[in-house]
Amino acid sequence: MQEFEPKIVAFVCNWCTYAGADLTGTSRIKYSANVKIIRFPCTGRIDFMILMKAFENGADGIIVSGCHPNDCHYSTGNFHARRRWIVFRNLLNFTGIDTERIQFSWVSAAEGFKWADVVNNTVARINEMGPYENYSKIAVSTLLNEEVDSNE
Amino acid sequence: MNELKNKVTQLLNDKAIDVFIGYGQGSADRIRAIFVRTAEQAGNLIFNASCTQNLAGYLLKHEVKHLGKLGILANTAALRSMMQLASEFQIRDSEVLVLFVNPDGSLTEFSSFISIETFLGSTDTGITADEKSRIEKLEAMTVKERWEFWNTEFEKCIKCYACRAACPMCYCHRCTTDVNQPQWIPVASHERGNLDYHLMRAMHLAGRCVNCGECANACPMDIPLNLLTYQLIEPIKADFGATAGMKADAMYALSTFKPEDKENFII
Amino acid sequence: MEKELKKLKYSDLSKLIERFGSQGYAVLAPVHKGKIVEIEAVQSLDAIALDVLLSTQSAKKAAFPKVEKVLEYTLEKAGVKQQAIDPGAYGETILFGVRPCDASGFKSLDAIFGEAPGDQFYLRKKEKTTIISFSCPTADEYCFCTSVGGGPGNTEGSDLQITAISKEELLVEILTEKGKKVSSLFADLLTDAGEVDKAKFLADVKVVFELDSVVQKTTSSFNNMELWLDQSLRCIGCGACAFVCPTCACFDFQDEQNTKKGVRLRLWDSCGFSLFTLHTSGHNPREVQSQRWRQRLMHKFSYMPEQLKVVGCEGCGRCSRACPVDMNVKEHLTSIGQLTI
């Protein structure tokens, strides 16, 4: 039986977290390889539906990370993102979606160590939680393999 | 009720309005929206405890607007919808003649948005005790139990979009659900398609919902959709100090921010 | 075939469901779901809501489901490879406890999907569906089946029809070969019925308009936009009426895929949606709701009678009950019938 390897998708901003992740690499800090990083110009650009798409396409966990407040490359993008996440997290929790599987963070371009920590801690946590079974039941891949006849 | 009929007749005769949106007797024991354009039709206007439909959505319907200057019988929910629509530049001050039936049966004519704001400031506009307890019951469940609850409800959804059509805040000419480049929201009414749609709609209403309940009333499958947006009202008020539909010049909570906004989950 | 009349004891009804199940039939029946009544798969009689006026949704989902896979494809090195889905891969099904209006609603769907070359996904499912309807002892103010050629005891479209004739006994009418085949599963429970006046046990549904006159007047009213506007001002353009209707058959196709595989789905659609007739050019021949309302009524009461020789409405009233803003088709048709043209 293959051991469970969590699939994590990370939505990060180009100017801080992506650069920070680069620093992690150039500093030769080892961290879990389970994460796929998707680069956005700013966290303000991250639509909440994208997080849902990640779960629907098989992600077991999500990281969303950007510049610290007051450090946004576009001045205010992360402030808007913060409000959006506060509301979205509330909605997700109320609808029964596991917000423990989504990690939000501020990681600056200078925080190579922090990025490794965020990833490692998230992977460890998701590893313990196991695959996201509830979501995999309704995932895209499930539709592609089974009958959708709504008579059942 | 006679005061209402007489007032509307007078308004029509004076050409102060071309059409009045009010309530009339519907099928069986239902009430329906009626569009009064003549004195004779004004005789069909009624007002009683069953007249709870939020009529504000009709203010933006193309064929209704085309009938001319609008008058509306607004209840509290409709007044709030109007304030929210005004804050989103969908209606202008004094463009619509607004009548309101007071608890004692007398009529108030709101001359401007300011007068509506003042009135709303002194009225109970919150969600009902029953709705509050239903939300609390859900919040007391575990995450897994809530997932079961909502997926069981969403299984019934047939994607008829009655919730969207009935909501006065859903007025986008091209709803994001209908955009197919890219197709964000699956059109299909399978579990994923239903979940995505309802989550998306709740988010697009966060900070804009005036708890009129039309979405849940409209749903032919009896899904308690209103609870999804109602549940966000308290946190948005607590976290951002914003309540929808109280002022005609309010700013939308999700397109503004305060540098000192607080949260406890970002590391 | 010649109709056969039999009697069945009410207390034996549960045996029918058990036997259907053990013989490999799937049984779809009305089921309470909170305040609404859905049509779903059941395993036993006590799950079935036989006491309701009618289900919230129609029975059309038995042969025309709200989401249906029609095609699968995979992306391979050589290109896209399609896999056809066998429309006949569907088990024998019994629709049990539905009303006469559900059963007769299939005749509109048969006409639409049966047009050459024939929609196999519908036709093959329908072939394998046996309909056991229960006649109506009650009706409400939304019902108008008798005005459109139906009735509370109408057997059109049913393979078997059951009528309660006393607290203990049911009249069973065996109407078709399909019905006979299914009834053989419980032939031992049936006794000869002799003479039974079924009409005594049916609801009284008064005729409210003359169908031919309404069809003719609807047809002549195409340009009477004032009529359509007046009737549809409160319509908010959702799809509730089309989706609960037993005869509405409009559908949409949507593809869903990941990077390796995909599937084509057929879904319900509604002519009431503003985007229904939106062209890629941006032009929309039915831009406003009154045009779409006109289309809805004329499709059912003018175009279908003319082209398919069937009226696209069973008078079940579901559309009006489900409508969020109380559009009432019985009322609308009656007022069309009263026009002087």
Image (cartoon, coloured by chain):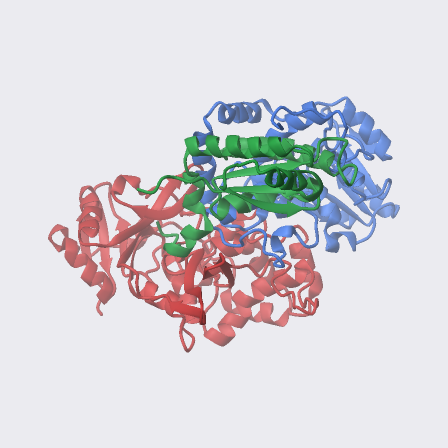
Q: Is residue C299 left or right of residue B142?
A: right
Image x and y of residue C162, in percent: 27, 52
Image x and y of residue B215, in percent: 59, 40
Question: For residue A3, what is the image quadrant?
Answer: top left
In the displayed image of the protein, which residue is found farthest to the bottom?
A: C116
Q: In the picture shown, does residue B116 fall above or below C130?
A: above
| Image quarter hosting the N terminus of chain A | top left
The chain in blue: B
Q: In the picture shown, does residue C95 fall above or below A98?
A: below
In the rendered picture of this protein, how many numbered marks are placed on residues? Answer: 0
The residue under the point 38% across, 66% down is: C121
Q: In the picture shown, does residue A47 fall above or below B108?
A: below
Task: Check the rendered structure and report the hue given to chain A.
Answer: green
Given residues C258 and A1, the one toward you in this image is A1
Q: Is residue C39 left or right of residue C323?
A: left
Q: Using the rendered image of the protein, determine whether residue B53 is visible from the camera's viewpoint.
A: no
The chain in red: C
Image x and y of residue B65, in percent: 78, 52
Q: Using the rendered image of the protein, determine whether residue B246 is visible from the camera's viewpoint.
A: yes
Image x and y of residue C141, in percent: 49, 47
